[in-house]
Amino acid sequence: MRPKKSETGRGLSKSFQQPSGNLFGQSYGELLKRRKERCQSCWRTEKRIRYAIRRMVKSQACYWIVIVLVFLNTVCGAIEHHGQPIWLSNFLYYAEYVFLGLFIAEMLLKMYGLKVHIYFESTFNIFDCAVIIGSLFEILWGAFHPEASFGISVLRALRLLRIFKVTRYWASLRNLVLSLLNSMRSIISLLFLLFLFILIFALLGMQLFGGDFNFDEGRPTQHFDTFVKALLTVFQILTGEDWNTIMYNGIRAQGGVSGGGGIYAVYFVLVMLVGNYTLLNVFLAIAVDNLANAQELTEAEEEQKLKEEMQANGENMANEYHSEESMPQAQVKPVQTLAKPSPPIAPLTNQRRITGTSVANTWVKGEKLAHAPLPFSQILQDGMNAERTRLESFGKLNMVSIESDDTARLQGSTQQTQGKPILPYSSMFIFAPNNAIRRFCHFVVNLRYFDLFIMIVICASSIALAAEDPVWEHSSRNAILEHFDYAFTGVFTIELVLKVIDLGVVLHPGSYFRDAWNILDAIVVFFALVAFVVRVYGCASSTGQLKEIISSEKLLETIG
């Protein structure tokens, strides 16, 4: 009876050890294998569909279809007008839905074919997506709130931006747009310079012609009585629109040609020469320069993109058709990669690279012998020796680098403490380089926020000059601003004295009057002091006007 029990137990154990089948008589291993094959076939089909859509959205036919759609959408926007018939309004209403649906389909196809992260790497694609989202928001808002206003006219204006889709496919136009975008940094700097120019000549025009453009036939539209009007008048002169009429009015306001008013024509000629023929033409020069650079880089960029696309497509196709064959090969390589030691974490200095050549040679030998059957103990011993050598060289070089870093840090702190050195010349034959007064002036002038403080005072002086009333010279506002002008003149005088004591006058190199901007500052301060003295001793207002004219040139320091 015992053998029967043993056979029964063995049968039960075998039945428990065998994997149970499913309803169709298949094992779980076979079922998983079939599911994996199905997933791989679905993945291959999806990849083929993606590649087909990618080729379609990049084809010439798709290019012309998008161009035609943009053109038709522009035509539909152009024929819309006030008082149009009802049938035209209905046609344009449904046509907008059709165009929006087509553009949404184009966007979704590109997202699927190129993948979402690649799609949004392009600025033009981001622009298209923003326009489509704005159009969708407009339609949804109009559907749920037909009578409410949420800037719908502005959102509808976004549809007009679709015409810029042409720049995506028109290479020369795209280069022009990209060159303009790349030159925005230079253009912004030039715009700031142009604004300063307009501001300076507007303030100067207020001092020259404020309250004088009042003729028997009335005051013309272009005048200099207020700050805003002065800015607009100078801008109109820059555009060249009737600038000669404004010039003739200025000459007539100052007594005409026979009365000495002809000299005031220099003001308008300077505005035209410097502003119109110089600054405005710099815009064109910057755009042309960036356009030439864009055209030079276009061919290289297109070749590089073509190489990257071909390489990516080749890798994807290879992964698609050889994924199953490459899997067993990847499992055969652990012995080969075992002999390759890991590279160092990061090179610290060039000297460390030199001292680590022996370690590199050891690694090269290990790589050359990787395909040979080496015992594991020898591989481990070589790796430990190489690591010990690397750590010893690291310790030595670390001490050297610490010492060099400490030395550099001490030198930098010494330079920061000393700052800009005093010129090794005698200032005005009185103040030697080690003189206490000169050292104090040098310390004040080279303070961190000294130039910022002077710049703030210059801006405040310009604001006060723009706030003056040129029509009523003895108004209460001008009386208050006159006291501020005294304070500003005092600050500029103190700045002049400090810099002259620190740098010297003109004899030695680096002195004060060897800089053109310092000469301009000295001229401004000199005329301001002259006008102040004349005003205190009660003389003509023409000198005060001259002081205000020269003070407006203080804005030029913001450029320097």
Image (spheres, helix red, strand yellow):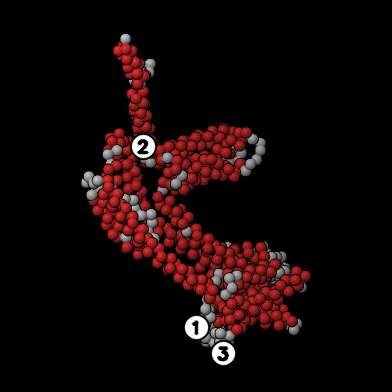
Residue type at mark 3 is: Phe
- Frontmost of labels 1 and 2 is 1
Farthest left residue?
Answer: 372
**Which numbered marker is on residue 51?**
2
Give how far apart the Cα atoms at labels 2 and 3 are.
Answer: 83 Å
The kind of residue tagged 1 is Pro
Identify the mark nearer the N-term, 1 or 2: 2
Quarter location, residue 403: bottom left
Q: Position of residue 160 (x, y in %)?
A: 53, 44
- The label shown at residue 137 is none
Residue drawn at x 43%, y 37% is 112
Q: Are marks 1 and 3 in contact (CB under 8 Å)?
A: no
Type of amino acid under label 2 = Tyr
- Mark 2 or 3: in front is 3
Whole-Å distance between the Cαs marked 1 and 3? 15 Å
Q: Give the distance between the C-alpha atoms of the residues marked 1 and 2, in whole angstroms.
A: 71 Å
Residue wearing tag 1: 509
Query: Residue 446: x percent and y percent?
Result: 57, 75
The crowd level at tag 1 (other Cα within 10 Å; few <14, some 14-19, many 20+) is some
> Can you see residue 258?
no
Give 102 or 489, whichever is nearer the viewer: 489
Badge 2: residue crowd in 10 Å (few <14, some 14–19, many ≥20): some
Give the percent coordinates (x, y) of residue 458: 63, 71
- Which of the two discs, 2 and 3, labels the residue nearer the N terminus? 2
N-terminal label among 1 and 3: 3
Where is mark 3, residue-wise? 429
Q: Residue at x 71, y 83 (%)?
A: 534
Q: Residue furthest front?
A: 2
> Quick one: SS at disc 3?
loop
| Circle 1 or circle 3, nearest the eye | 3
| Relative to 412, residue 519 above or below | below
Pick the residue in front: 474 or 465: 465
